[in-house]
Amino acid sequence: MSMDLYKIFSSKIPVALSDFDPRNRKLITFLNPNSYVLASERGDLFENFDWIAPDGILLVFTLNLLRATKYKIRRFSCDMTSIVPYVFNVAIENKLSVFFLGADADSLNQSVNVFKNNFKELNIIGYRNGYFTDITERQSIINNIVYLNPAIVFVGMGVILQETMALDLKKSGFRGAIYTCGGFLHQTKREINFYPTFIDKLNLRFFYRVFKEDGFFKRSIRTYPMFCYLMILRGIHKL
């Protein structure tokens, strides 16, 4: 039987931006309503993370409504509207190296160039797309990352795949900080800020993604109703 994702999630929600400091070498992932549904049957994976951050205003609102923690929950996302500038700047100030893993090869190459142009002092020691021909190639990439020993790894491969990769990196001996980042490595392929400023300030990121990302709306109409259902059940259970 799957472990209770809600209980695991609510026990690992970060409080402040400083919780994402890469010098702490934490294993960190993020959940939004879509990924929460997809992850709901794999609570065992998420139990092994140090922090599980709530990504999305709907999720934050629901968790606060259910009083999932004793403190007010904030939105944290692995993108330029939230934690990434903080992590990049800490990396630059402390000369920490970074490795990016995920997305398709073309998108990743473009995104890395965007990072280099906007964070010129960021020490990017490697990057690799998130597609593998077989298990042997996948393990070879893991071994290479462990050998390179970056201080920070960003993994953007989609929920479950990226969490599994993060855990396998740790099991293979990696001792740095790991952040799963979903579609971040794809979103930044053209410019550093995927969301216009007013979209971010008005918390309209969901609707902007519907407009900009192919397939996002189709995924959402399958998973968001289920997310609401799961949260209603949780609310009833707490009464």
Image (cartoon, rainbow, N blue to C red):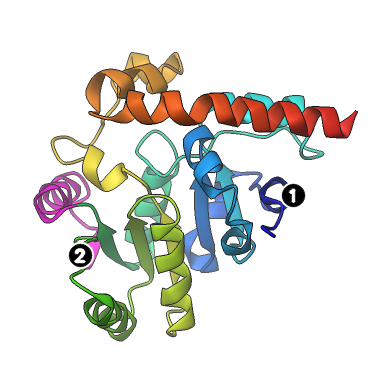
Q: Could you tell me residue 101's position as x and y percent?
A: 27, 62
Q: Are marks 1 and 2 in contact (CB under 8 Å)?
A: no
Rounded to the nearest whole Å, what is the CA distance between mark 1 and mark 2? 34 Å
Whether residue 81 is situated above or below residue 122 in the rendered picture:
above
Query: Residue tagged by mark 1?
Result: 7
Q: Residue at x 30, y 84 (%)?
A: 143
Which of 127 and 165 lies nearest the eye of the viewer? Answer: 165
Whether residue 3 is situated above or below residue 229 in the rendered picture:
below
Give the position of the N terminus as an image quadrant: bottom right
Q: Secondary structure at mark 2?
A: strand
Dot 1: few (<14), some (14–19), or many (≥20) neighbours within 10 Å?
Answer: few
- Please tell me whether residue 56 belongs to the stretch shown in magenta: no
Query: Residue tagged by mark 2?
Result: 127
- Please tell me whether residue 107 belongs to the stretch shown in magenta: yes
Residue extending farthest front: 1
Q: Secondary structure at mark 1?
A: helix
Q: Could you tell me residue 66's position as x and y percent?
A: 77, 29
- Left or right side of 211 for 154: right
Dot 2: few (<14), some (14–19), or many (≥20) neighbours within 10 Å?
Answer: some
Q: Residue at x 35, y 59 (%)?
A: 154
Which of 117 and 146 lies nearest the eye of the viewer? Answer: 146
Choose the circle earlier in sequence order: 1 or 2. 1
| Range of residues picked out in magenta | 104-127
